[in-house]
Amino acid sequence: MTSGVGAAAQVGLEGKTAPIGDRVFSVVTRVFAVLVLGSVFGMLLVLLEGAWPALRAFGPRFLTRKAWNPVTSEFGALAPLYGTVVTSVIALVVGVPVSFGIALVITELAPSWLKRPIGVAIELLAAIPSIIYGMWGLFVFAPAFGRVQPWLTAHLGRLPLVGALFQGPPMGIGMLTAGLILAIMVIPFMAAVMRDVFETVPAALRESAYAMGATTWEVVWQVVLPYTRVGVVGGVMLGLGRALGETMAVTFVIGNAHDVNVSLFMPGNTISSTLANEFTEAVDPLYTSALLALALVLFVLTLVVLVAARLMLRRLSAREGART
Amino acid sequence: MTLYAQRRAVNAIGLGFSVLATAFGLFWLCWLFWTLVHSGARWVGPRLFHESTPPPGASGGLANAIVGSAILTAVGVLLGAPAGVLAGTYLSELGRTSRLGAAVRFVNDILLSAPSIIVGVFVYALVVRHTGHFSGWAGAAALALIVLPVVVRTTENMMRLVPDTLREAAAALGAPVWRVTLAVVYRSALPGILTGVLLALARVSGETAPLLFTALNNQFWSTDMSRPFPNLPAVIFQFAMSPYEDWQHLAWAGALLITVAILLINVAVRMLLGRKRS
Amino acid sequence: MKTKTTSLATCVALAGVAAVAFAAESTISGAGATFPYPLYSKWADAYANEAQIKLNYQAIGSGGGIKQITEGTVDFGASDAPLKPEELDKAGLTQFPVVMGGVAPVVNLASVKSGELKLTPALLADIFLGKVKKWSDPKLAAANAGLKLPDTAITIVHRSDGSGTTWIFTNYLGKVSPEWAKSVGNDKSVSWPVGVGGKGNQGVASYVQRIPGSIGYVETAYATQNHMTEAKLENRSGAFVAADDDSVQAAAKGADWKSAKSFYVVLTDEPGAGAWPITGATFVLMHRKQKRADVAREVLKFFDWGYRSGGKAAKELGYVPMPQAVIELVEKSWQNEIKDESGGGLWPAERHAAR
């Protein structure tokens, strides 16, 4: 790993013999680097301080209680947490295979003149802000989906185990709608990462598999994917992290009901939509504290997922060697 | 079925699925854009840029929200980008192997992927509670916190791409580290750094959640940053969820404007980067 | 070279835009109930032309209004759920009513027109409790002989935010249904047994418009402005009434403002042949001790203007203006209760205008 001029010079950069310009440079840049550190620690501290009253009042059972009653000041994170997890799982269940397919097409199937346009088109999906997804979801997708829902209830609703997931009135909005829109939002991120890691597979490896007579699918499934396994999982976790924290798109279509339902057609809530809806109105200090506790849970959740993702992606780049 | 035929079938199914998946992804993109243009384009007119947001049941424009968003974004970028460039400079020039550098890189990744609503909650607790009211400054601070990690990352990556031989050559001529950085590294990495700033700009243009508890909104024309400040995403949120048709039309028009602005920025980024590559 | 010019241009542009940010304006800010929002924004528009003072009102729900004024982040708060005198004392606030209005049940049923559906209080409570689940339920048919109701599920739409409209609605349901009073209660935000949550009156109206077979509750101005299908409700005297100017006025007639401490008056389930059962007033909250006397004065001037000149706009939107006697009581309370930091009075403005 190249170390630049700085590392060796750093020892002498702030010493009394260093030129004044260097001393200023070193201090100034270091201050701003520490500022980055400070922001995140500040965030954690502020959340902890604010959430403390609620955590103390409810204890670890806060995570498993369903009640959310501002009247009697009883709060539990189960409903928003459930909604966050379920919508993110739906997003992954739908999004991962689709992203995989897109990455496969871009790297193996598309003719070279088509590779860039498809890539650009998928990146455009990523550039669209989430409030637009929310609006489109509420105005266009939900009514259309509301017409599909009775069909789903009639056909899939009868299956033994899975059927319970598809019961309920065809409102158009609900957990499944939110999950589907999340899927569309995270697909570009996961597809981009998968495409990048697929492209790191050495040509020699792929070509030799082709030379032995493997089909395209076999090359991808049995050579490319195992080689890039860690990177792919890292990309999926990146998508998961994004899905967990997504606010605006979900708030429009999830129905804002503090409820835990098996059926995916029913409305629910996620941590971020609860915050968006209720934060400016919580008068009671315990209410505000419960909301901050929710924010803390979300922060920790995304933190864990992100750390895992980064670790995996770093392992992959260490293996590559060629990249810095 | 022979093994060969089986493998051929699996291949066909797998590839067919992949093509369908790509079509699936592109389908949503097309539907979204078509809706946006179809619902929004006809409400975009000179009136949109002249008049401020109307009360319910009346017609008007989005002038105050557009200008308000422009100001908030500009101030957010002006606050976050220089800080980000300097922090990224530290990581690239002085902190490549230091422990502080590793810590900052790690934490920067966290900040980069933190849900933007948490950033909003943080700035609410820090700024709004202490100043006693919602303000454009709080909103800009929240946006700056979102800009910061993007710029740090791209700055570091772009500066790292500059070969060390250039640095060493300048150092051999007797230039101190700060001079080397300014005259040599920045000059080479500038398109890349600018790209990072533009990407951050594109990202915060559409951010709604962090502004919900910081800048709130203002239905009038206002350039007073110390009070609730008009901004386009909050207006869109409010208008889209309302039952008033006039408001919904304005929401679509605003949504189209934001998307077009972000796309233009992305195109600019591509042009800048493209030239660098070639 | 080109990138240098680009970056220079970008910086100048950004700085130029940011420089505009340093201009100040004269605005008063308020936040709270969505109930009076159509009225306040209409008043604000007209007032801005007359008095050059802009009112920036953010309709974030009564709960939000109470929170923001308690924390002092706005100049006045608005709530349809009146605060009890003890709560007002504790927070150092004073409240006064501005207009009265009704809350109407609205439905989305293709085969039903506005005013055709009839609901008894028990039915309304049972629907919102989740006990009556389908429009084809025999109890509904019994009250609506001759009306064709489809066999679809009833989707409840309630408020997802802290709402004075919810307070008024649940107050009424608590009075007419002992089961509601016991299991759900009366507050700005309750634990709804079933349903989807919309943000603000406009969110509920929006969802009801979109979801077939839904029922929600909104302030009457929203129902009228958006041509929604309203249901008739049976009042205390046994008559099925629709929520309109006359029925809301009839309910407001019996209000005794004089003896109410801090104007704490609840208007649900009022007696009277033509009275609308779900009526309420909307209140404004201000601090008793004002840190910025000039701003407080502007707020009072705005509402004084609203009382004097805003009645026509209020009636057009379906609200009921306060009777003159009550206005006089309110302005007297301004004189007595709202003071600046040194204890000096703020109202009437001409007498106390700062120089």
Image (cartoon, coloured by chain):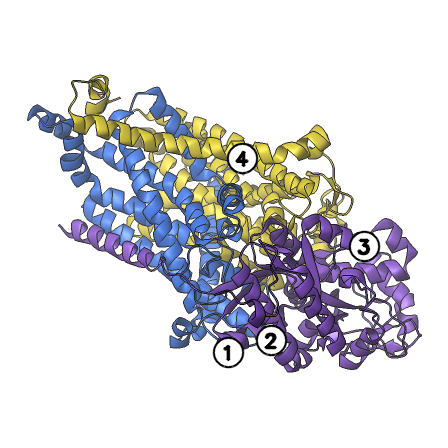
Chain on which label 3 sits:
C
* Residue at image mark 1: C50
Q: Earlier in the sequence, mark 3 or mark 2?
A: 3
> How far is mark 3 from mark 2, CA to CA?
33 Å
Residue that sits furthest to the left in the current view: B173
Which quadrant holds the N terminus of chain B? top right
Q: CA distance from mark 4 to mark 1?
A: 45 Å
Residue C250 in the image, given as x and y percentages of width and height: 83, 78
Chain ID at mark 2: C
Q: Secondary structure at mark 1?
A: helix
In terms of secondary structure, where does tag 3 sit? loop
**Chain C takes which shade in the image?**
purple
Looking at the image, which is closer to me, A22 or C29? C29
Identify which residue is drawn at 14% across, 28% down: B167
Q: To which residue does mark 4 refer?
A: A46
The local crowd at label 4, few if under 14, some if 14 to 19, many if 20 or more residues have their Cα within 10 Å, is: some
Q: Which residue is mark 3?
A: C186
Q: Please check whether the numbered discs 4 and 2 fall on a single chain.
A: no
Of residue A60 and residue C329, the one placed in the foreground of this image is: C329
CA distance separating discs 1 and 3: 40 Å
1 and 2 marks in contact (CB < 8 Å):
yes
Callouts 1 and 3 close, C-beta under 8 Å: no
Is residue C139 at all visible to an observer of this figure?
yes
Which residue is the site of mark 2? C305
